[in-house]
Amino acid sequence: MTEAVTAPAVPTPTVSPARADELERNLTAVRARVAAACRAVRRDPSDVTLVVVTKTWPAEDVRTLAALGVTDTGENQDQQAAAKAAATADLPLRWHFIGQLQRNKAASVARYADLVHSVDRLSLVDALVRGAERAERRLRCLAQVSLDSDTGRGGVVPSELERLADAIASHDHLELAGVMMVAPLHLEPATAFECLSVLHERLRDTHPGAVIRSAGMSGDLEAAIATGATHVRVGSAILGTRAPRVPTA
Ligand SMILES: *Cc1c(COP(=O)(O)O)cnc(C)c1O
């Protein structure tokens, strides 16, 4: 007599055993870094969300990471993000959009993103409002601030942060959830994140619900956690550094 075999709800990951091992090892190491950084400043590790940045890596890696307990994944390019979100739609993942966003991609991002970290100009706010309206949802957004005079990596200068945040918060279809920063190359990350901390606390006087602070990547997550980051965005320390570069459209 044969027993009926029920198909698993989640398809088996298709990465090689070696890749699965590598992802598990790296993820374990990064989780330990997050935990140690929290311990060092007496923060509860559950207050820090690890966003695993899967840009340039395939959906199979995303699936493997989800099986290892990853709940939050980040992408910086709409085309890749939309494809991976669709390919893993059966998984309970929250997608974070973290890259510079063109206005004509805002409607697409508004469909799958749980949180847009990189709202960095007023003209993008209007495009996101239209996208969120069309998707019939409320889209959570972070105002990205930059300490770089060259804002090539996105972000408003600190003096413009309040105006950008007010613009996001003024629309029913958007929710101002907090702030985001990429530490500039010319500053110690700890110094940059201290500045972000001051800017964020000041913003919370007028926007108390904007509690998220997205800061810290593979190289500087400890400094970010020490200064109060609630979300760290970690790519290469988990996925590796040898993904083929996909040109940004
Ligand atoms: C790629 C990227 C990250 C992750 O960087 P790693 O150094 O690979 O951890 C974080 N934030 C943004 C905005 C990124 O584009």
Image (cartoon, grey):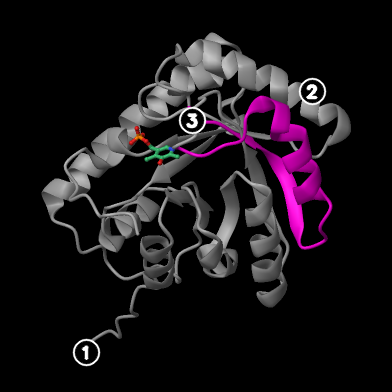
Quadrant of res 201: top right
Rendering quadrant holding ligand 1: top left
Q: Secondary structure at mark 3?
A: loop
Q: Is residue 71 above or below residue 134?
A: above
Name the foreground residue: 67 vs 86: 86
Residue 134 visible to an observer of this rendering: yes
Give the spatial CA distance, label 3 vs label 2.
19 Å
Q: Amino acid at mark 3?
A: Val
Q: Secondary structure at mark 2?
A: helix
Judged from this view, the residue extending furthest toward the right is 206
Image coordinates of residue 196 in percent, x first then y, are: 63, 22
- Residue at 43% over, 61% down: 78
Image coordinates of residue 134 in percent, x first then y, are: 68, 76
Give the spatial CA distance, label 1 vs label 3.
61 Å
Image coordinates of residue 164 in percent, x first then y, are: 73, 42
Which badge, 1 or 2, is on the more N-terminal residue? Answer: 1
Name the foreground residue: 138 vs 15: 138
Which residue lies under the disc numbered 3?
182
Residue 227 visible to an observer of this rendering: no
Residue 115 as seen in the image, left or right of residue 5: right
Residue 26, label in figure:
none
Q: Amino acid at mark 2?
A: Arg
Give the spatial CA distance, label 1 vs label 2.
70 Å
Name the foreground residue: 40 vs 195: 195
Which residue lies under the disc numbered 1?
1
Quadrant of res 30: top left
Residue 202, label in figure:
2
Q: Is residue 128 above or below residue 234?
A: below
Q: Are marks 1 and 3 in contact (CB under 8 Å)?
A: no
Please report the bounds of the magenta region as a residue range: 153-182
Quadrant showing the N terminus: bottom left
